[in-house]
């Protein structure tokens, strides 16, 4: 397994193709440090003894110890471990652990390639296993290029005025395929080793060119990434973990990029477009049942801390709000456990979590998120919005006055009061907090996508039969 | 295992001590048939091959096949089975399966008696095992006498003006103890073989007399039950399962009732009052994670049926409402699965489900219930409120007109339309439906009791440590 | 103005055409007394000095003092008074005041007849004024026959397999028109003097036969009413106003009923079908901004009383729940005030309340109703569901025990405890309470009808212009 | 009336005492331009003919035309106009109009000074009128210094370890009083002419020193302001109104500041501390019934625009979400209208809006706000979070690609798509948007303050009497 330093060295060797704020930047640009610190956790903590077996796993290919973020789930236990690992890590960052992107996509590919091979007699699955060996041996960081920019939402891919609005194969060559298009909301692509690409939706037979899945290094010729980052305001004196992290998303543009055949995992099998899309979504929503409870842990802990510092800890209405937060966290986590316990092996042996439990869990997390922010805001009061800047607390004229006037609960130092409300500002009053809201609602699938997934997979007919039986209506 | 006929015969032999509407009634009074039909399901279906291993279990005492409603949970699997059994049965009645009362209390007693013995050197647990053998061998129906009438809520038991407002020991004799008081909301007591009694709350050392647990036949001398029942309006022509069930609750009054020592499971150990109360609540809330999803199945199926008959099936807003219902059902069920998977054995070997998962599940069920009614009402329209009485549909002058004017979706007969909306009336427009709402909110513990249970068992301090870590505040 | 006795005498003279539970009943059947007691309030209190000017008005036709329930609103003040009258009266019954049906329909007719005349050169408005004089002079009780049974919701009236599924003109004769069809959810028709009928929806030019409005006595030849009633359980000893009221709805069937021309207010003007439907709905939704706050007053008062008797008055979480109830009541009432203040005169001079304010008010009332029930249920506890029957409290053996065990807050007598929780049962645990839920959601228009009304009348384009302006997007 | 240029000139003449980010800045610092642009609207538009009578009023002192933001409400009509003016102006900024701070405080002072004079024989009211003349003649901008920093929330002002944690009089001199303390969340103080100070809470007789109200220029000796600002990211090429505004709040510190007697409006009359606090809150909450609907107009328009550009306009679930937004806007606005219509004159003749209507309106706005953000986020999708920076759209290599891949709905240019989603980012994905959430929840009083105000002013006893009457319980 690599160290974070190994990973950074590898990144430094990559070709600069990242654009940000009108400039091309390298992969060691300071603006990427905050976002990259999430990945750092996955390398650093995997070395720690106490996380052994949780952050690490045994490869079913090589029988070697590997980082769990490169592992294929071969049992219900693996899925439970992945969920627990995700919650554990996401408690150590206000952002998200990010590396789930790769592992969720790897597992999806391990399922659909096998299914295509069975249906079509292709050899994608063995090819994928070769790639997986390479991925595990090199302890790579992958990201998921799934969501196309989509153009006119009322038109199908092949009906778009510009056919590139969904990524597609424009040419097949002996050495590989040439792809063109763009993948949006491509989280962590700027500092991932590999981009794993799949279709984003159901396809029809006119859309064989859009049925394409592959892996590609993030700096391959013909790829440009335009990125946005979001981090809490950096601190000069009052250093704190909360301010050391961030998020980063790319619009990843493929301009006639060559993908060698050994990295192509679907090419033309349009019948499997929807399957690929929904499999990644499913694994990723299962990851959400780990990460969202952890974010609620952060919100909840901060709410409890603000309540204590504001002197209202233990009040009945505060207790009810904390119970609301706990309920969100544990209903979502419980749904993830149920999804793992009710998981089933696919034809390749990879375990697939239960669709309904994953989706009701993810949906509840998404639908509850803004309410969680409201609770923290409500309990913390207005100070997170009007707290003077860090520098003013250290300015000679007004600094001492700020420390005088921030005093509240007896026994809590001015600095700790300051730290508590500055973190609360970072969580609910900053652009970083605002981005977390949008990510929390849409990441891994917007609420309406979960409604579709739930209704598409639920045995509603059986419930109607129950109603008919009770009503005395003859059922077919 | 007994048959329903065996059970009825036993009941007929019991001494009449049931009061209803100003009259003393016998245990084969027609008003009890609807409620008793729930119990019937537990006897009848346990005989069916397809429910073997689900509705039946193997006694850890006798190694005999027993009804699972008399079983002690000896593994996570047992708890999963109990939950699944509960959901399965509760889909066959609009009321509830009711017999969980006994099994939940048996399991609670099997835990706290052992704990008292360990702490105090008493012999309650062996005594309980003897009783349990008798209970399993005779395939008895038990109920839970836990909630006292409580008098002034601001005063403790020993502070009440009338000390009987919490049930208590008034005398200890050689042959047993004499108890006085009343247990409220005592579901199914009118047709249970046995009443299982425990304290309802934390007790202090002044309250040793109130620390009492025991089993007693429902017709023991000195016991009077004042009951209320609730059933859908009975049908004359349009028979349907929905109208064949009901619920029944007793105010069970103990007027200096003798309890022989071999049936006493706590007597004076006030330190265990709260433990006993919370253990029954816990097992019962876990049962709710099975029964409430089943009731949502009924609501959901009826909503889907009404939508179909109203011709609005598949509309986007209907889909969202159905997804809401599915989410409630499966979040609650998922929480119950997680509670079973995370269960731990107690000192007696009985498995205890996870407190937090049980309580967030039960709370979510309770908090969502009225909203579920709203959805069904919304989709069904006003007809459930203004549907003419059954008799009018069979009256010669207006019957044909009613059948003419009830026609709506093509292909659905007048009778089926009628059946659909009559059942909907039974569910949301009847006193039975109204009772279900109250039971659904308060049964097994009101929402505020779950808030208390959640906050009392959750590691909130750990979440504050997470917040402090991220904020850079030194933790103790 | 008539007395209640006058009204009753008139009803007794009407031809029996009411069917209920398979039997034909007369208009003085005991089952109608509860429902009719609401109408009694409108007669009795109109005689009281203190309600002068509120329950009475001055006719703009005759300049005589009339009951406000027969008045045409000629000013904003009239609409404010109508709203205030409605809230005042609805605080004296757990049901609803009911007579708004007639006044809301009269006002609607006074608007659309004038508009038809202006557009078509007809003489409906003068004809209506003649009818109105008769109505006011005789202080009549009217009801609204608007909602058709509608058949297949996906088909328009003229597309139905059975054309009678929307009420229509089947023949025009010299003396009048012959109508056939049925009106559903026809509240209070069983004891109204007059049924006022209008179309229920937008119509197309193929649907001229369905464009019909008229007034007809409730017992006219060819009319049959099939009714359902709902009242709290009647009391034998513990008499209380709450148990003296009820509701009653008819399915009113017109079998080739003759309507004389002088009572016909629309006949063939299909362009005005939707206008007529929406006008009644509008006036009726404005009435809801008076009655729903009053029902919330009842729920709120009962919640506060139950909290007091349960000894939890003043607790923080109780206060928040009471504030929720107050907010519902006053937001809805405030919307009604705004609707009156922003009302505009129609071409006939009748004032029309603001559509958006009426509809957001009614919608909020409907969407909040189940939550209000949940609050009362939550605060009251389980007792409303398991309270023994009234007769048991007066039975010699168990009565004294019930009175012993119902004691709770010091200083409150057993009888008052009993009264409090029996009323709570009537409100939330009875078929009457369940009917109130359905009526509260669908009466005067289901939530989705208000969504349609709001979107159809709101200047959303203006808001998009605001957004475009701020975004710097050129607007047309 | 002044022009914006006059106002700016005056500000430039003020003594620099503003601290921000560790530096002292002048009042023409570029960071204040965005916030100040709100004030600009109040000057510029007051000159426009079409806003005459809405943005202007006639002084009851001088009979001169004045800016309505300096006017005392002398009628219900004045309150309606103030509310309408507020909504009108707040549709032209994504921030808030800000100048309501001054007018709300002036009106509060105009009430309580008269009441103190009546009770105590003081001469505060005439003194205030002199000040008001000066204020109106000079068309000043005022702000409200009300909220103290409060220290330990469990201790009263006089119990604090540091008595300065509530602002207080430390000395009375012949020429005036000396005050010390700090006012938090002091919106717009950095560019207001005048700071109007009142107590923040109920006071006891030990707290006469804390009972102090006065007016003081923002740069008076002994005052320091430490400020935070918040604005959308400034644009270089894609200029748009949305990005031209901002907000600014001061922690205003009074270090032994002299207030001349002619500017002192309360000094020692502790009985009026709570009255002063609640009066400002009341006027300000009434202002919220104007500004919050306007902000919802902005959210709603943007939601509708994003729906159109995303090609989902008119979908049923979108309609329901828009109806939710409309309902929030108009319920709040309607409550404000009702508050004005039910306003009453105080002893000084200043009209006081109805407390309950103001508070239920403000509470509903606050409780709904996060849900409104959720709706816009839901409809807009993830793009507001991952939209590349403005500069990248104009960078030569990737700019054309971004414009290619942002295309969606046919007929909408890339620039307009870009504009729409950049504004959405400004509203929901920026620190500015996050600040708006906190301000929207806590500004003018946190939800719990409205609960307290509602319960303190509502006739709940009357509702209990209604319940008792219906239950048949004798009332006192």
Image: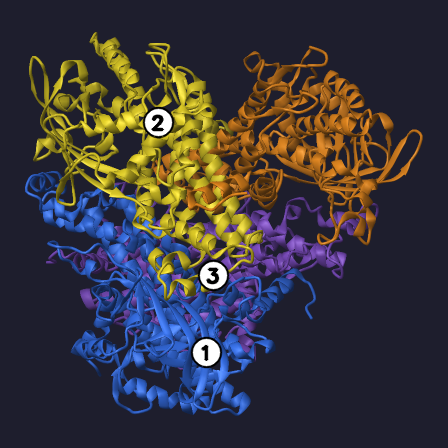
Chain colours: A yellow, B orange, C purple, D blue
Q: In the figure, is residue A146 to the left or right of D174?
A: left
Report the residue at 55% width, 26% height from top. B342
As drawn, the label of residue D179 is 1
Q: Nearer the viewer, residue B54 or C286?
A: B54
Describe the element under mark 3 as helix, strand or loop.
helix
In the rendered image, which residue does mark 2 sit on? A43
Q: Nearer the viewer, residue C15 or A294?
A: A294
* Front disc: 3 or 2: 2
Q: Label 3 near label 1: C-beta < 8 Å?
A: no
Q: CA distance from mark 3 to mark 2?
A: 53 Å
Residue C59 falls left or right of residue A157: right
Density class for disc 3 (Cα within 10 Å; few <14, some 14-19, many ≥20) is: many
Residue C147 seen anywhere in this rendered image of the structure: no
| Chain for disc number 2 | A
Residue B274 in sight in this render: yes
Which of the 4 quarters of the picture holds residue A346?
top left
- Residue C349, position as x, y percentages in the image: 29, 74
Q: Which one is in front, C310 or B7?
A: C310
Residue behind mark 3: C327
- For mark 2, give the secondary structure: helix
């Amino acid at each position: 397994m690599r160290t974070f330093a190994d990973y950074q060295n590898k990144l430094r060797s990559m070709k600069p193709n990242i654009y940000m704020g009108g400039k091309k930047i390298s992969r060691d640009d300071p603006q990427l440090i905050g976002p990259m610190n999430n990945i750092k956790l996955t390398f650093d903590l995997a070395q720690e003894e106490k996380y052994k077996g949780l952050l690490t796993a045994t490869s079913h290919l090589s029988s070697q110890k590997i980082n769990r973020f490169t592992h294929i789930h071969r049992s219900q236990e693996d899925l439970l471990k992945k969920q627990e690992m995700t919650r554990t890590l996401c408690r150590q960052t206000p952002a998200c652990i990010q590396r789930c992107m790769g592992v969720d996509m790897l597992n999806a590919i391990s399922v659909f390639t096998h299914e295509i091979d069975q249906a079509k007699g292709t050899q994608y699955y063995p090819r994928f296993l070769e790639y997986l060996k390479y991925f595990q041996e090199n302890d790579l960081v992958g990201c998921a290029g799934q969501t196309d920019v989509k153009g006119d939402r009322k038109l199908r891919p092949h009906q778009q005025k510009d056919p590139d609005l969904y990524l597609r194969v424009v040419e097949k060559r002996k050495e590989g395929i040439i792809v063109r298009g763009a993948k949006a909301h491509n989280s962590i692509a700027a500092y991932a080793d590999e981009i794993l690409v799949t279709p984003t939706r159901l396809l029809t037979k006119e859309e064989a060119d859009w049925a394409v899945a592959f892996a590609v290094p993030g700096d391959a010729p013909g790829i440009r990434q335009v990125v946005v980052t979001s981090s809490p305001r950096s601190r000069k004196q009052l250093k704190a973990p909360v301010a050391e992290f961030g998020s980063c998303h790319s619009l990843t543009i493929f301009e006639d990029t060559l993908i060698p055949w050994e990295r192509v995992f679907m090419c033309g099998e349009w019948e499997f477009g929807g399957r690929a899309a929904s499999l990644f979504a499913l694994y990723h929503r299962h990851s959400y049942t780990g990460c969202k409870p952890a974010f609620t842990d952060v919100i909840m802990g901060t709410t409890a801390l603000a309540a204590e510092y504001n002197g209202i800890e233990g009040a009945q209405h505060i207790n009810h709000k904390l119970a609301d937060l706990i309920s969100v966290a544990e209903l979502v986590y419980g749904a993830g456990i149920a999804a793992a316990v009710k998981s089933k092996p696919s034809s390749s042996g990879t375990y697939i979590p239960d669709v309904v439990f994953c989706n009701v869990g993810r949906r509840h997390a998404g639908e509850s998120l803004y309410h969680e922010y409201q609770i923290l805001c409500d309990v913390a009061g207005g100070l997170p919005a009007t707290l003077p800047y860090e520098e003013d607390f250290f300015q000679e004229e007004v600094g001492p006055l700020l420390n005088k006037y921030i005093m509240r609960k007896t026994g809590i130092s001015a600095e700790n009061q300051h730290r508590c409300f500055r973190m609360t500002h970072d969580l609910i009053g900053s652009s970083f907090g605002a981005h977390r809201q949008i990510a929390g609602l849409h990441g891994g699938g917007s609420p309406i996508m979960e409604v579709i997934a739930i209704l598409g997979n639920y045995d509603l007919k059986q419930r109607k039969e129950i109603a008919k039986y009770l009503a005395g209506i003859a059922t077919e």
